Image (cartoon, grey):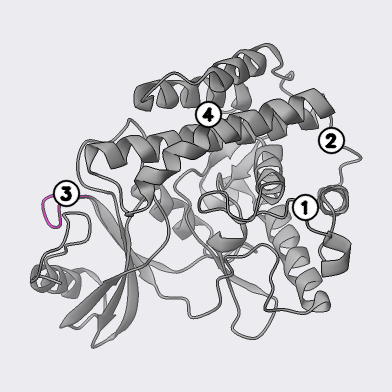
């Protein structure tokens, strides 16, 4: 990948990188070949084929970054902490904080050979298999929210309490910093969220931040998760944020940006649980009777996704996005805000 016309995001100095990894990862042997994974808009991710095996390299995008964004060092830390828990994660091998080597911070992890599904309807599976995969996602999410933070050394991985208040402030700031034009629906949504914040109920767990089907690698032949990926947005926070975020995505149309939803589909006919059934299964696993303020959690999820998408569109305008389709994502900000306002109107 050192020759030919490639963007700064895609180019990696393979010879220098191979020499570096050979001195920092036990048993690593070059030469290497590097191929960028398709999909994803945040941290460019590469498959590294070396004489010693296959690895994955995940880096920050080059260029000016928003504060606290693209935290690959946090991804590395949390996956290393979860290595011996019930949450399946790849084995992380090395974190390079020297931005001079390839132009940004990066880490290397094992390559998990399995299946990633991009279509929430799972058309390649039968009904029984679909039910099994959604049940497994539910199980892993509950396991994630049941992690012993003290045992894993993650008690300082985020601030305790007032999670949604802090998140709302953070993502409002991120949105304003990347705003390309005024969007009335986003302004209206942010105003409502600010007035509808539920009282802090004391729940605090590890949260993934982007928990969804295509961030999970499944076993090649079984409905078993072998690796949860993309921990960039993970922190200590409120577990209902993850649950609502996943349910929000499943409410969306099949072709909404890079997200595949189930809007308008007959879940029962597909063997996929309804939102009510999925939430009930989660509650049973967590020992919870019910979830109050569900409309707020869903609306906040739409808002946060819209803010993330706006950031991607801003990076595309600045020439720092990791995908050629990033510039088109800006068109989804207003529809996402409108979906949130619709949830508020119907369910609050």
The residue drawn where x is 47% and y is 55% is 230
Residue identifier under label 1: 264
Q: Earlier in the sequence, mark 1 or mark 3?
A: 3
* Residue 280, numbered circle: none
Quarter of the image where one finds residue 188: top right
Alpha-carbon span between mark 1 and mark 3 = 46 Å
Q: Which residue is mark 2?
A: 291
Visible residue check, residue 97: yes
Along the polypeptide, which appears first: circle 2 or circle 3? 3
- Of labels 2 and 4, the one closer to you: 2
Residue at which label 4 appears: 159
Residues in magenta? 99-104
Q: Pick the quarter of the image with the C terminus.
A: top right
Residue 99 image label: 3
Q: Nearer the viewer, residue 272 or 140?
A: 272
Q: Residue at x 59, y 46 (%)?
A: 149
Q: Is residue 69 visible?
A: no
> Circle 4 sits in a helix, a strand or a loop, which is it?
loop
From the viewer's side, name the closer residue of 87 and 291. Answer: 291
Secondary structure at numbered mark 3:
loop
């Amino acid at each position: 990948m050192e020759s030919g016309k490639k963007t700064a995001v895609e180019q990696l100095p393979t010879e220098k990188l191979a020499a570096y990894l050979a001195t920092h990862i036990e048993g690593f042997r070059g030469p290497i070949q590097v191929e960028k994974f398709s999909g994803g808009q945040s941290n460019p991710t590469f498959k590294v084929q070396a004489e010693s095996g296959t690895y994955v390299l995940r880096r920050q995008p080059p260029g000016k970054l928003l504060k606290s964004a693209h935290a690959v060092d946090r991804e590395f830390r949390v996956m290393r902490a979860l290595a011996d828990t019930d949450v399946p994660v790849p084995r992380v091998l090395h974190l390079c904080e020297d931005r001079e080597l390839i132009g940004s911070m990066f880490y290397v992890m094992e390559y998990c050979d399995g299946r990633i599904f991009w279509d929430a309807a799972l058309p390649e599976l039968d009904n029984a298999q679909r039910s099994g995969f959604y049940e497994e996602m539910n199980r892993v999410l509950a396991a994630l929210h049941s992690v012993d933070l003290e045992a894993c050394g993650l008690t300082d991985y985020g601030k305790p309490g007032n999670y949604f208040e802090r998140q709302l402030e953070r993502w409002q700031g991120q949105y304003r910093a990347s705003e390309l034009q005024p969007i009335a629906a986003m302004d209206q949504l942010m105003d409502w969220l600010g007035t509808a914040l539920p009282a802090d109920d004391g729940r605090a767990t590890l949260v993934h931040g982007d928990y969804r089907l295509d961030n999970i690698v499944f076993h090649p032949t079984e409905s078993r998760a072998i690796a949860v990926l993309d921990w960039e947005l993970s922190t200590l926070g409120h577990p209902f944020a993850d649950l609502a975020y996943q349910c929000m995505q499943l409410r969306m149309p099949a072709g909404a940006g890079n997200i595949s939803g189930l809007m308008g589909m007959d879940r029962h006919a597909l063997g996929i649980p309804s939102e009510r059934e999925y939430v009930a299964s989660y509650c049973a696993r967590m020992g919870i009777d019910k979830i109050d303020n569900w409309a707020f959690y869903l609306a906040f999820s739409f808002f946060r996704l819209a803010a993330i998408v706006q950031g991607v569109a801003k990076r595309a305008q600045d020439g720092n996005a990791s995908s050629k389709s990033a510039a088109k994502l800006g068109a989804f900000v207003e529809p996402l805000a409108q979906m949130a306002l619709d949830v508020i109107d119907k369910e609050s």
